[in-house]
Amino acid sequence: MVSDLSKDKFQAKEFHIAFIGAIKAGKSTLINTLLGKEVSSVSVTPETAVLTKFRASKEKDYVKIKFHTQLEWNKLWKSIENSHSNIFKEEYIELNAEAQKCKWIGFKEKYMEFDNDQDLINEIKRWTSSKGDTHYFVKEVEVGLKALNYPEYILLVDTPGLDDPVKYRSDITQKYINKADAIIVCIKGDSLTGQELSTIYNVFATREYKSDRIYVVGTQLDKLNTPNDDWKKQRDEWLKHLKNKEYFGSIDLAERNLFSVSAYLYNLLVNFSSLNKDTIDFELTPIIRKFKFRDIENNIDQLKELSGIDNLNNRLKSEIISKSKQFMLEEVKEDKKGLDINQATKEELERLTGVGPLYAEKIIKYRTDNNGFKTINEIKKIKGIGRRKYNLIKEEITVNYRKLDINAISLEALQKLEGIGKVCARRVIDYRTENEKFKNIKEIRKVKGIGPYRYSLIYDYIEY
């Protein structure tokens, strides 16, 4: 049976291309370049605080804002209280956001049209910037652009950084990853540290499938000392990781879906005729010298090519956008097999027979606390889902469980495995670090505290 949500999604003609990465990885700048207009907020500090969706508009440019309901706000505030993090509250108080709360919590929707670019940009920033006092109450922002040359059902989605110090903002992105139909992972091109690799792994581990629709993009190519030579070295290093099964799973796909770009350079070149002398002398010229060019005007096309933007955009159009309707139809067909309760959103779960909001939350909580469902029967462990309710939904659901790679699994995920706990999980991580990696599954038994019994508990859930 095809779920109503899949039908609705196809009929609504929405295909989401998400731009995901750490703070200041160049997500917003890259989106602005692809849009051909600087409308997504950029700043020297963490800026994007709200899911911001850009799509083509038939008539005028517009901004549509959806706000949190009172129930959603109460849950959000409770999660802040439980996190014991002061950053959110400090910002909230500093911006005097409480004065705005009664105006926007529960507000149904706000829609505005624009004839002036600057008014449009200011309005987007008002609702999406982490430095504004209203973003706390916004669920998402949709921006329609008349000049955007994409099909109307294609949405480019800017997201908060996965490492945003305000956890609820990074959680927005984490929860959204699996809703996206394609993902552009933005990573600074100058190095691949453990944190950047963790960001990439986070995306692949959450998606668990359709890795051919994930592009990894090394951004800010212009910040490398000698971009052409340095990126070749970086690329080889990145591919050593990305070819592995926890990422693309093959060297061919990794090589194909790894890009490098300089959106900043491309923007300067596109606007070259209107640049003032200082911008040319002190911003553009130093960059082109890194690419071993002296003359700008006679080499604009070649420099644009070196920026990598046209290559990324062309591949995006030919491999993702042009095939988007086909992908949407395939998802509808896949859904006939049942809803995967390890991947389903709260809204999808609510549509299951007899589930509703309360049990949807219970399912998600169990899934989060236990590293996912291993079998369909396991859903009966949730309080309130007995034989009768299980019989109602068992034909509507399925489980695709991905075993955890012991050489990539995080400390947090290890702690959730039955019988492990914090102490054993830390010992596993320490052993893996000291020995570079596990050579096989059985080697985990060498970790102090993991005897035959604990090993038997986790064996079916881990892989090498």
Image (cartoon, rainbow, N blue to C red):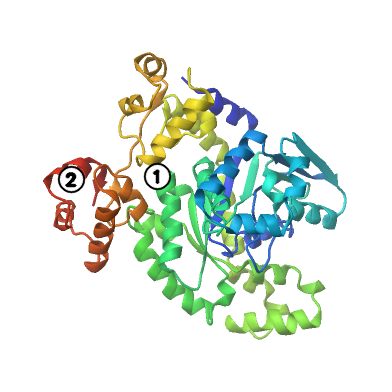
Q: In the visual, does 323 lie left or right of 401?
A: right
Say which residue appears at 38% left-offset and 25% top-offset.
Answer: 383
User: Which one is in front in this view, the residue at disc 1 or the one at disc 2?
Assistant: 2
Q: Residue at x 27, y 66 (%)?
A: 433
The amino acid pointed to by label 2 is: Arg
The residue indicated by pointer 1 is: 208
Q: Are marks 1 and 2 in contact (CB under 8 Å)?
A: no
Drawn side of residue 220 relative to residue 449, left or right = right
The secondary element bearing badge 1 is classed as loop
Q: Earlier in the sequence, mark 1 or mark 2?
A: 1
Residue tagged 2: 454
Q: Is residue 293 above or below residue 163?
A: below
Which SS class for mark 2? Answer: helix
User: Eyeballing the image, is 282 above or below 374?
Assistant: below
Q: Give whichever of 137, 281 is nearer the camera.
A: 137
**Closer-to-camera residue (369/41):** 369
